[in-house]
Image (spheres, helix red, strand yellow):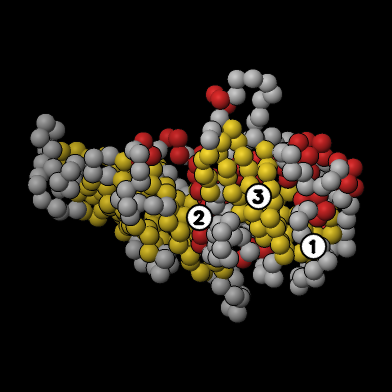
Amino acid sequence: MRIFLLPLAGALSMISVGVTLAQEAASPGAENQRQQEAATPPDYKDDRTTGAALVESYFNAIARKEYNRAWSYFDSDKPSKTFEDFVAGFKGTRDIEIEIGKPEEEGAAGSVYTNVPVAIRSVDDKGQEKVFTGCYTARSVNPQMQEEPDFNPGHLTSAKLGPSDAAFLASVPASCEGKERLSEEQLWLLRAQRVFDAERRATCSFYDREAVPAGNEPKAYTIEYNFSHDEQDMPRRKGFVLEFPCSLGAYNLGQTYYFATETDGIKPLHFAVPELDIRYENEEDPKDVDSMRIIGYNTVSELINASFDPRTMTFESFSKWRSVGDASSNGRWAFRNGEFSLIYFEVDASFDGEINPQDVLNFDAGP
């Protein structure tokens, strides 16, 4: 998430800003782009449903220069001695980014306390950058226990932050305890988890159960590649494949995937599959296939019983049509120039107790 116009004195009230950190030089083009982005405030956000959302809302208020709203997110322990000091502190910071790690919740006497690990990169009016890392703590009170005014929708209770000598994205804490930092894969998986939770989770039957079965947790894979138009000596690009279980049947597990790069962000993956016209010698007893042909192509947002090999950058799926697995469809998709292309598809359409698939599409070779 990118937000702007947050001064150090307001947001990082517990930090000694006299510490000098290594600064990265920015190109004139990148600098101009940042200035243009900083001039455009983000859309309004006031969400106190979770501790992470509350932290994002606090920064959103500052970015929009709604200082009274920002001040209100803190409970009795305010970030400055007076509101005037709080407002006066918003001088000098032109641009800021925050990256939120994995929040941790703990309950206590009708309240939920959420520790929200963060990394913060600030840029002042002179283009100088500093990176900070630490933790915000948010408290929310069970609404059903609040029978008398005034209603408490949730507040920030504390912020513990300090300077980091690591790069911004290498500074995101794995938790509010200890010094461990998230790896690149962990960071991208966490980012994709938020996208998945917002867009897909509610429609995924896999999460109707109380606990996620071992081995089916979300996964992240790193791939390195070059486009065909890249110069020969160009460094290899890096991307991340993010996997989340979604649909769950008696013998099939559907997985949904995202692909992420620093340039393009997080995008859902869709996979081409052939549409088949299958005829049986006896439609009442589909043991013997009379004919099978491709009549078109569709795309799907899930692969069934799938696996991904980061070495070959290839997906494979195995979709059972019934539990014994004697009828099925299996596909393979390979990474080419930023896209996953269908290169192989086989179908066993005969419900005959035997495993005897037939190729319906085979481009299983490099271009």
Residue 69 visible within the image: yes
Q: Position of residue 174 (x, y in %)?
A: 55, 59
Return the residue at label 1. 16
CA distance for labels 2 and 1: 32 Å
Left or right, residue 239 beside residue 14: left
**Residue drawn 82% across the image and 39% down it:** 67
Return the residue at label 2. 189
**Name of the residue lying farthest toward the bottom:** 233
Left or right, residue 329 beside residue 165: left
On-image quarter of the C terminus? bottom left
Camera-nearest residue between 60 and 2: 60
Earlier in the chain: of badge 1 and badge 3, it is: 1
**Residue drawn 51% across the image and 40% down it:** 107
**Kind of element beneath mark 3:** strand
Label 1: few (<14), some (14–19) or many (≥20) C-alpha neighbours in 10 Å? few
Q: Position of residue 349 (x, y in %)?
A: 19, 45
**Kind of element beneath mark 2:** helix
Label 3: few (<14), some (14–19) or many (≥20) C-alpha neighbours in 10 Å? many
**Name of the residue lying farthest toward the top:** 148
